Image (tube, helix red, strand yellow):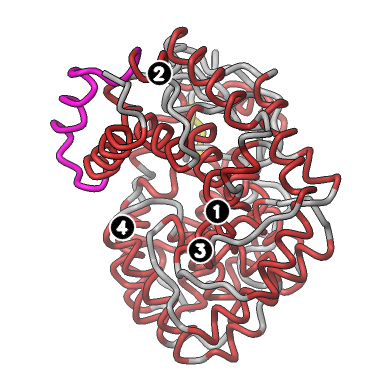
Amino acid sequence: MLAAFIKMLSSWKQPCLSFSQQYVLAQRASITVHHKFSTRNIAEKVDRSPTFKERSFDFFQKSEKYKDMWVPSNKMFHIPGYCETDGQSKRTMTDLIIDFSVSETVSNALKKPACYSSLISGPSQEKNVSLVLDHCTGNEALTMANTLFRIVGENFKKGFFYRYLLCKANHWIKNCSSHQELVIWSFLFSLEKSQQSNACLRCIYERFKTDVSLFQCLNAFEMSILCNAWFTSNIIVSAKPMLRIVENLLRAEICLSPGVFSQETLSMLKVLRKAGFGTDHLFESLMSSLSSPNARNLNLAQATHALALLADHRCLVDENLIQNITHLIETAAKKPLQMPYVFMHPSRGTRVKDLTRFLWTASCLIPTNVISQDRIASEIIDQVDAGWNTGSFQLDHDCHLLSDFFLSLACWKIYPQSLIDKIIDRSFIDVVLRQRQTIRQSRLALFLVAAQIEASHLP
C-alpha cells in the first residue's frame, strides 16, 4: 500500500514523499473522549453513540463513491512522527513500519495524553508539505488533506497545513467537477469555525448554486453533511431550487422512518428553517411523523428541532401530536436536569435550553383553550421551578432562556406568580440590561408589558 501511495505521488516533490513515508500505515486506536466543560483531570470513557462527525467519516470510508478520494487504508492511528517508550530510544514512523514487533508497545504508550503534544504543533515536515499545495490540483490536495486527517484526527485543524489549505481552497472549489469533492471539502472545512473556513463553505454553496445539477446528485447523507456544515457556519441557503431538493430528500427520509429524527434529518430541517422555507406537503409529512407512536421516543432536543419549523409557520396540530408533546414533557420530568458546566447528552437527561425552547414550540402550536385542559404547562413550570432551586439555571448565563420561558407562558395567559416573584427581580433585569443584546431585552420587556396588562396583581 505504501508503494502504491508513493507511486501516486511520484510527480510531487520530496517533502511530500517524506511526509507519506513517515505517516502512512499507522494503525488507528480508540480515542478518549474529552469535553470542554469537563472538570476532571483525566477524561472518562463514556458509552455513547457515534457522533455525526464520526458517522460522516465512516460513510466516506465505506462508500464506493469515495473510495478513490484518499489513500486506501482500512486502519490508521492517531500517532506522532516519533515517540519514546520505556527503555527504547525515539523511533520514527518508518521504523515502526519496518519493525511491527514494537508497534503494540508504542501504541499503548501513545494513549497517554502527554504523547499528543507533538500532534498539536504538527510534525516538522508539515510546513514543507504545505508548500507543495501551490503546485497541486484540487484532487491531489484533497487526497493529501484526507490522508492527514485520517492520521491525526481533530489535530488536523490545528496545524500549518490546514491554515494553508483554507487559503488555497477557493480556487479548487470553483473548479470542482464532482459533488463528491465538494462534500468532502465541506466536511473538512466544518471542523472549525473561523472566517476562513466560513468563506470556503460559502464558496461551496455558491458552486452548487451556479450548477444545481451537482446538487441533484446528492443522496440524503451527503446532503446532511452539507447542511450541517452550512448551518453551523450560519450560511443561509436562499436558492429556491436547492431548497426544493433538500425538501424532497427530507420528506423521503421522514416517510421512510416515521417518528424517527436522525442527525441527518435534523440537519436538513435546520437549513430549511433558517431559510424560512416550508411547503404544505412538508408540514403534513412532519405532523404525520410527529404524531406517530415512535415519536414518543424522541428526546427534547430532537423534538424541539422537529417542531420548530411547524412553530415558525403556526401550523395547526392534531390531538395525537398534542398527546405526544405531553408524553415527552412527562418523560423529561423523570430524567435528571443538567447542572452548570457539566456536559449532558440529550438522550441521558434534560438540558435547560431544550426545556425552555420546547415550551416555545408548544406555545406556538397549541391553542390557549387546549392548554388549559392539558398538563404541559404545569409540568414544565414544575421542572423549571425545581431547576432554579437546585441551581440548574444560572442567572448570568440563562436569563434569556428564563425570559423566553415566561414569554411563552404569557402566550397562553399563564403567569405563575410564585415562580415569577422568585426569579424576576431587579438583579434579573440588571443582568439582561448589562448583556446589551436587543432581542433579549425586547423579549423581557414584552413579557413585563403583557404581565402589566393581563396580570396586574403581580408586584
Which circle's residue, 2 or 4, is located before the other in the chain?
4
| Contact, mark 3 vs mark 1 (Cβ under 8 Å) | yes
Please, what is the three-letter code of the amino acid marked with disc 3? Arg
User: Which quarter of the rendering shows the C terminus?
Assistant: top left
Asked whether the viewer can see residue 66, the reply is: no
User: Which quarter of the rendering shows the N terminus?
Assistant: bottom right
Q: Which residues are magenta?
A: 422-439
Asked if 437 appears above or below 257 in the picture, the reply is above
Secondary structure at numbered mark 2: helix
The residue identified by callout 3 is 273
Per the model, the C-alpha gap separating discs 4 and 1 is 36 Å
Numbered badge on residue 308:
1
Which circle's residue, 3 or 4, is located before the other in the chain?
4
Which circle's residue, 3 or 2, is located before the other in the chain?
3
How many residues crowd mark 3 within 10 Å: few (<14), some (14–19), many (20+)? many
Q: Residue 52 location, x and y as percent?
A: 62, 49
Residue 435 in the magenta stretch? The answer is yes
